[in-house]
Image (tube, rainbow, N blue to C red):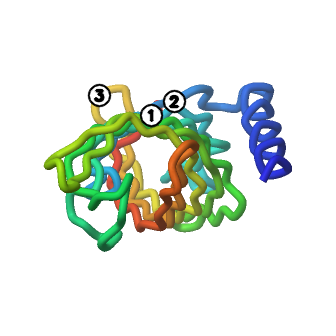
Amino acid sequence: MRFLVVIFLLICFNSFGQPKNNQGRLFGIGFQPFEPTGINFQTFRGVFNNNNSSLLTKGVWELGVGKENMLGITGDKKYLGGNWVKGGIRFDLNYLHPIITTNAPIVFQTYVGGGLQTGTRLYNNSGGSQSNVATGANMMVRIEFVTHGIELDRAVWFFSIYGDIKYHTDFTENFDYISPVVGIRLRKGR
């Protein structure tokens, strides 16, 4: 596990040292329906693909805010002697590094990454509804499709649709899960 953390940190630090490419630092905002259900913001270095109709990334930092377990897709999970229930507020910061990129006619990218997640976790036990602050690590694999650009005024915007398989484990409790993540995002290309 320590080896994976070291490799992950080296990749993250390398993302800051990349030379500037044509588009520099860009941003996006998106919505994901599950795990956690909420919004996310991202910043990345981007370049237009070969035919200048779509946008690919050179590494993505994401900040997410949402409520966990809203759709109950991870099944019945036990947490601190009770049942994990929906509604805990979660914050996560992840870095995703592209490992496979195809860029004609639209961009398709595959990423690996990870990060930290913290916030409240809700559960029910014999004492009723309970809440606990829970912090842990995320590891994920993502696939993402990016549409053709839409010009609005002097900016070019792109929609991306993504899907993840995420593994989350708590640092202090014996609690983990594997969950799909799906979302849609609007990115500003220039």
Kindly identify the residue that appears in the image at 17 percent across and 48 percent down.
127
Q: Amino acid at mark 2?
A: Leu
**How many labels were placed on the picture?**
3
Kindly identify the residue that appears in the image at 26 percent across and 46 percent down.
122
Left or right: where 76 falls relative to 113: left
Left or right: where 108 falls relative to 5: left
Residue furthest left in the image: 128
Tell me, yes or no, whether the two marked residues, 2 and 1, touch with CB atoms within 8 Å.
no
Could you say whether the residue bearing mark 1 is in a helix, strand or loop?
strand
In the rendered image, the vertical position of residue 65 relative to residue 122, given as above or below: above
Q: Nearer the viewer, residue 128 or 33?
A: 128
Residue at which label 1 appears: 63
* Res. 28 in view: no
In the rendered image, the vertical position of residue 46 relative to residue 128, given as above or below: above
Residue at which label 2 appears: 26
In the rendering, at what x and y percent does residue 121 appear? 32, 44
Q: Nearer the viewer, residue 68 or 76?
A: 76
Q: Would you identify the image quadrant in which residue 88 lies?
A: top left
Could you say whether the residue bearing mark 2 is in a helix, strand or loop?
strand
Q: Nearer the viewer, residue 156 or 172?
A: 172
Mark carried by residue 153: 3
Q: Would you identify the image quadrant in which residue 94 lies?
A: top right
